[in-house]
Amino acid sequence: MNQAERDRLDALKRAKKKLITQKQAAEEIGVTERQVRRLLRRLRRKGDRAVIHELRGRASNRKLPAEMEQRAITVLSDPVYRGFGPTLAAEYLHKRHQITVSKETLRRWMAKARLWRAGHRRVVEVHQWRSRRSRNGELVQWDTSDHDWLEDRGERIYLISMIDDATSRLFARFVRHDSSEENMRLLWSYLERFGRPLAFYTDKAGMFQAAVKTKRQEQREGRDRPQMPPTQIERALRELNVVWIPAHSPQAKGRVERQFSTAQDRLVKGMRVAEVRTIEEANAYLENEYLPWWNQTLTVEPADAADAHRSLGKEYDLTAILSHVEPRQVTNDYTVRYSGKVYQIDRQDIRVGMRKARVRVEERLDGTIAVRFQDRYVRVRRCAPPVRALPPKTVAAGKPRPAQTTQRKSDWMKNFSIRSGPSVRHAIEVSHARS
């Protein structure tokens, strides 16, 4: 019997002895006068146990059978479900094993079986919270994660993600290399599906910003950053009229970083259960399972229903914009050199002022080469570079050199033998005798 039940029993006994009225007892206990009369009748029949609830000690009618608990624990003890939390485990039990149980009940089961233990995260540093943008497409956070996504079941792959700041809508793809080319391919897919956002928010990686070269032992703190040529992605965003915003810390682009934290837990475990081993299978799982779950579960409604994405007009040629672009100079014979190769401009496309002029060379994502002079593309064909003949070597006039002859060994020690001479002692004795 707890303290509340003891207080209720005391009030009932005082009401039974007419020390207080039933109305006063009802106000003290917190029930109606009718309930007080019921409790008094029960008190006469059962005694002090009248204040104890009759369902105490009895199993709930909604209690799940012990066989279901044992089956769920047996399933979750499999190594494939290693590290699963109660929420994710409840989803997989319902979807794959037809065991429907709430995450709180499963939390108790897993804690009792030592399959899960609650952890407390310690806050190391507090950063100022930034509110979401109001419209979809105002700001898109863009980043890459090099986590061990396949857990040594296959090759090393990277996950490139683009998440909308206003709605948390996710767009992602697995790639083999975190290169400008692969990031451009994902950007192409995003632009075709959603349109041009107002701004992209990324880190200061080399593909987004050219690094400033400094001398050894030289510091750049407190000095202005010199103007550097744009990278290929930075140039492409300028041509698309999309603002690029660099983040000064990982916490600044926390939305995409937290998305990676969720993916490194839920996505990795999902691909482990699905036995994903190749990048093609990983992208299929990402498109068919993970992204639909994310965009249906974790997205929010924007403050403004208007979409800030802009359409792609005819003036935006993604094939030309999302290329590796470099300027080159036309030589006197109307050829262009690029990447160690020589390209001849077609005779019909030669224009006035083209010689010694600058042209735009585009190495596109499909490997083809396109050359543009001013506002028109010219046809080119690859040709072999000219081979320059070296002039013959000339010998200065003068006295001709004598022909070199092989030297033979000198014979000045011929017939001279050290072994046939007298010994040292004999030579000394002869010398003394003569003296």
Image (tube, grey):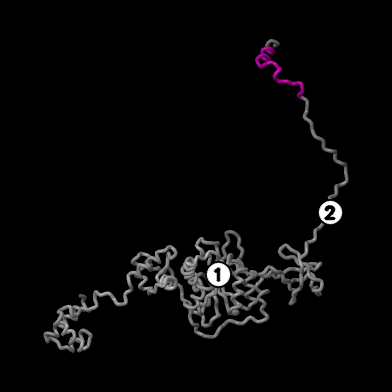
Instruction: State the mark number for residue 174.
Output: none
On whether residue 5 falls in the magenta region, the answer is no
* Left-right relation of 139 to 25: right
Disc 1 residue type (three-letter): Asn
Whether tag 1 and tag 2 are in contact, CB under 8 A, the answer is no
Instruction: State the mark number for residue 391.
Output: 2
Q: Earlier in the sequence, mark 1 or mark 2?
A: 1
Disc 2 residue type (three-letter): Pro
x and y, in percent, of residue 240 in the image: 63, 77
On whether residue 420 falls in the magenta region, the answer is yes
Closer to the camera in the image, 64 or 328: 64
Helix, strand or loop for disc 2? loop
- The outermost residue toward the top is 433
Residue at the disc numbered 1:
283
* Left-right relation of 360 to 79: right
Q: Residue at x 61, y 78 (%)?
A: 192
* Left-right relation of 196 to 129: right
Neighbours of disc 2 within 10 Å: few (<14), some (14-19), many (20+): few
Q: Would you identify the image quadrant in which residue 356 lies?
A: bottom right
x and y, in percent, of residue 341 in the image: 74, 63
x and y, in percent, of residue 233 in the image: 62, 71
Helix, strand or loop for disc 1? helix
The N terminus, quarter of image = bottom left
Q: Would you identify the image quadrant in which residue 279 lies?
A: bottom right
x and y, in percent, of residue 189 in the image: 60, 75
Magenta-tinted stretch: 413-431
Q: Residue at x 23, y 85 (%)?
A: 30
